[in-house]
Amino acid sequence: MSQKTIPIEALTIGMYVCGIDRPWMETPFLRHRFSIRTHTQIEKLKQCGVKNLTIDVNHGVDTEQNLEDHDTANRTEQPEPANTVESDVQAEVQLATERIANLPHTLRGRSLSNELSSTREVRSQMLESVRDLLSSIATSGIIQANQVKDVTHSIIAQTLEHEEACIALIRTREFSADLHEHSLSVGTLAVLLGRLIGYDDAQLRTLGTAALLHDVGLLRIPSSLLIAENRLSKEDHELYHSHPQLSVETLQESSDISDEIQEIIEAHHVHLDGTGYPTHMSSETTSTSSRLLRVVDEYDELLTGQLGLPPMSGKQALRELYQRAQKNQLDQQLVSQLVSQIGIYPIYSLVELNTGERGIVTAHSKENLLHPTILLIQDAAQQLFAEPVPINFATMQKGTSIPEIIKVLDPEQEGVHVEQFLTDWVTL
């Protein structure tokens, strides 16, 4: 085993520290993975209240092995001039203060990597539950209310507990004509946006159920109409546009699905300017929940590409929603709330700066959505930094040259394993 935990008293020069029993933001060190080169470092760790550390013996000295090889070096270490030691410490603390002390408090006590990994597993399980539910409806034509209730409760609980990870997994998936992916994603987004605008638990359950079942009518039309690359004829469009009414007809087969849920679903393709479908419905009578469902439904469709549209990036999709809101097709306030919830650059995004450097988004700034907190992992030549560097735009001095994000990259195409970097570093 290459790593072991030791008390601070056993720490000595030559060891490589890879973990500390204090939150990252409560120490003056820019990183928690470094070699111990001076006694000053050890004293600083003690001053911070560190009691135990984790060392990597593959990168440095062990407590039981190789110590004799370093005893001489420790005994003969030349005392550092006082002014040099002090200036080094001050520089280190100043750098840490600029880059760490003002990081968003929402990062405290969280492991982004563990959250993403665990949420991916949970989402996989929920996808199977939604798949089973829709498959049962497609086969029998009947909605089992208890099954719907259980799946809805699961979506709500997991979504509210792992907001950013859920958003990231929605954004990075590919289009699937199978409805379970879309149903779960729309349900997740609806719950997040509903909570943001102040829905209570009962309202969230109603909204979550409507979002989960909003497209069950598509189970009653040819699956070929759901293939993203297909160009639909006029007749096919008319058939496709009938799916909200087909959804309601399916819901009416179950006495346990409320009229409110049916109304939300029936109107979820009605636009504020009177366009959309079904044509007999007026936009003036649509509920907030129907308008909310319309917004998140379109967002997910834009991300994955449907009805012949090419898939968009998260930023492009939000821009398109905003433009549609400007045309009075979508509720502008709800679109703005969605942008605020998701952020222009969602957490876990891999972004490139105008400096050529690349990093992973780790937190939003509600004051400026264009300036999230990021963890720089590559330099301008796309070479990995020896240690990632956290950057919080909000703490940079005004008047200085502040980097700008110029594009969002696909981590898989760039050979970047986001969870690996977060495992090694951002566990606060």
Image (tube, rainbow, N blue to C red):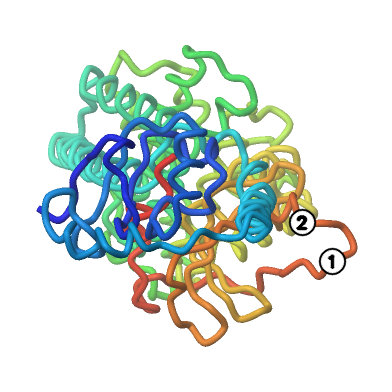
Q: Which mark is residue 304?
A: none
- Does the residue at mark 2 contact the one at mark 1 (Cβ under 8 Å)? yes
Tag 2 residue: 396
Q: Position of residue 355 (x, y in %)?
A: 66, 79
Whether residue 105 appears in this view of the structure is yes
Name above or below for residue 133 compared with residue 391: above
Tell me the SS state at disc 1. loop
What residue is drawn where x is 76% and y is 43%? 367
Cα distance in 3D space between marks 2 and 1: 7 Å
Tell me the SS state at disc 2. loop
What is the three-letter code of the residue carrying label 2?
Met
What residue is drawn where x is 22% and y is 44%? 121
What residue is drawn where x is 50% and y is 35%? 190
Tag 1 residue: 400
What residue is drawn where x is 39% and y is 75%? 229
Q: Position of residue 390 (x, y in %)?
A: 56, 57
What is the three-letter code of the residue carrying label 1?
Thr
Of the 4 image quadrants, the one containing the C terminus is top left
Q: Position of residue 3 (x, y in %)?
A: 19, 51
Relative to 42, 402 lies left or right: right
Relative to 229, 102 lies left or right: right
Name above or below for residue 257 compared with residue 227: above
What is the total number of numbered labels drawn onto the structure image?
Answer: 2
Whether residue 344 appears in this view of the structure is no
